[in-house]
Image: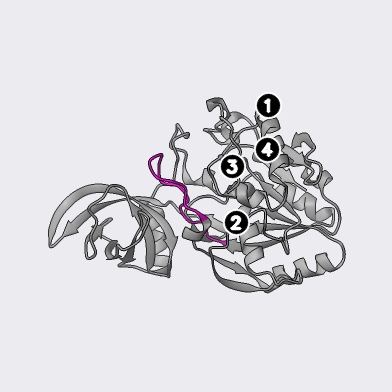
Amino acid sequence: MVTIPFSLPNELNADSPPERRGIRRDHVRMMVSDLRSGESQHVRFFDLPQMLKTGDVVVLNASRTVPAVLYVDQMRDGKCISLKRELRLAHRIDHQTWDVWIVGDQVQQGDELIFSDKLTAIVTQTDFSFPLVQVQFSLSGAQLFEQIYSLGDPVRYEYIKQPWSLDYYQTVYASVPGSVEIPSAGRAFSWELIFRLREQGIQIVTLTLHTGLSYFHDDLPFLSPEQNSESYEIPEYTALTINHAKQHGGRVIAVGTTVVRALESAAKSDKVCLARRGKTNLKITEETPLQIADGLITGFHEPEASHLDLLSAFVEPSLLKKMYEEAIQQRYLWHEFGDIHLIL
């Protein structure tokens, strides 16, 4: 596991959206790092078209964030044993079934969870090695999502001081509900910036990977990729566009670690991207030969997060350490409302 020992000053935790700090979302700062030399320059995200070239492909994750924090009354054998327990959606299994984290303990198979007079669930499995249980909801598909959006709040971690609404946890292009945490690397994109990239001859394509719950609280570790199986889908057009670009010298720029995981999960060893849907728990490390992604747009990550392992597949750990030291020195902001790191 790649670790970069650093202490993040509290003031570098972005606790509010840039729009609430008087900055357009596409004007956050961006550190542009050369993956070979480790040298960096410092611009705004709006300058992205100048960093790319005609023929490149930018791959976005079109997954839409769902409000994954809900509250339930817990019933057992017809008796209420707990009121308003916090429940966090973790991974969607199918149209009616999710893995969830119910804060606290004393959850048993067969417990009934009452969300409202329109939505209930039954605990169907509790035999996990980490603190998730599986539940089956009384509704499915669009009806279930309608109730989740009606009842839930977005996942907010301890560095967030205000209850920002779900709209702040969406990318402008998100269209397919399913992520319990925002695929945050794409948050800085605006439609204006996307149009500018297209005018420059840079292809914009999408895939879908629904992010799972990656973190519980300070007493429990981050989930590793192996524990965090996530659903993804790469459309035919996306695969064809990527393969055409790679055949003609274009670069594939993944927007977020989620996009890298999806692309590399659907890659053949001859650097061909396949149109595919499925689940992935692929762990990418410095020893992983990347088949598809040539560059990465991402945020800045905690020293304990497995994202740093994935970043080390693009750039060797000693250079990554140098980049992060420079990011702290230059006062870049961390987390989903923070600044952007382009590794190319």
Frontmost of labels 4 and 2 is 4
Sequence order check, earlier mark of 1 and 2: 2
Asked whether 207 or 288 is in front, the reply is: 288
Callout 1 crowding tier (Cα within 10 Å): few <14, some 14–19, many ≥20: few
Instruction: Write down the residue under mark 4.
Output: 321
Instruction: Write down the residue under mark 3.
Output: 3
Measured as percent of width and height from the top left, residue 143 is found at 39, 66
Q: Quick check: 148 above or below 161?
A: below
- The type of residue carrying mark 2 is Thr
Measured as percent of width and height from the top left, residue 207 is found at 63, 63
Sequence order check, earlier mark of 3 and 2: 3
Q: Which residues are magenta?
A: 209-224
Sequence order check, earlier mark of 1 and 3: 3
Left or right, 84 with reference to 188? left
- The type of residue carrying mark 1 is Gln
Q: Is residue 28 magenta?
A: no
Instruction: Write down the residue under mark 2.
Output: 258
Query: What distance separates the C-alpha of mark 3 from that of mark 4?
Result: 9 Å
